[in-house]
Structure formats: structure tokens, C-alpha cells
Image (tube, helix red, strand yellow):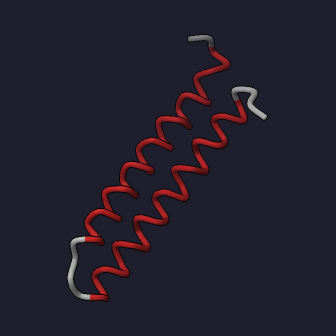
Amino acid sequence: MPDDQIGPAFLMVLGLAFGSYGVRELALAYRSDPFGEWIEKAVLGAGGLAVGALFAVCGYRLLGGA
């Protein structure tokens, strides 16, 4: 891997990690009963997906995407 692609690859891995965490939290929120627990897990899951998407878009842009 050339040196100029290490940063975007790292951002993509971070995006994957945060995105999978977000999906996991949303799945746990779907199965939780009390509303307070549900909203906490849903907010964490949505935040994880948003941060994961941000890292993925930044990595894509660094690779020369549109």
C-alpha cells in the first residue's frame, strides 16, 4: 500500500468500527423494553452511525472521490 493511502485506509477502518458499533447499539435498542433505556441506546447507535459515515466519507474524499 503506498504511503499516500494509509490515512484514507485508517479512516475507512474507523468508519467501519464506529458504524458496526452503531448498528449493534440500534439492534440492542430494538430489543430493550423501558423507554429510557431504548432512547439511550438509540441515540448512541445513531451517533455511532453518523460518526462512522463521516469517517467513511472523509476517507473516500482523500482517495480522490467526488
Image quarter hosting the N terminus: top right
User: What residue do we see at 61% from left, 50% from top?
Assistant: 54
Image quarter hosting the C terminus: top right
Place of residue 31 in the rendered image (x, y in percent of width and height, measured from the top left) = 22, 71
How many marks can you see? 0
Place of residue 23 in the rendered image (x, y in percent of width and height, measured from the top left) = 37, 56
Left or right: residue 51 versus residue 58 is left
Residue 12's place in the image compared with 53, above or below, is above
Residue that protrudes farthest toward the bottom in the picture? 35
Residue that protrudes farthest toward the front in the picture? 30
Left or right: residue 2 versus residue 10 is right
Residue 23's place in the image compared with 35, above or below, is above
Residue 52's place in the image compared with 43, above or below, is above
Q: In which quarter of the image is residue 17?
A: top left
Residue that protrudes farthest toward the right in the picture? 66
Q: Quadrant of residue 39?
A: bottom left
> Camera-side residue: 40 or 27?
27
Residue 2's place in the image compared with 44, above or below, is above
User: What residue do we see at 28% from left, 71% from top?
Assistant: 30
User: What residue do we see at 74% from left, 31% from top?
Assistant: 65
Place of residue 25 in the rendered image (x, y in percent of width and height, measured from the top left) = 32, 63
User: What residue do we see at 39% from left, 73% from top?
Assistant: 42
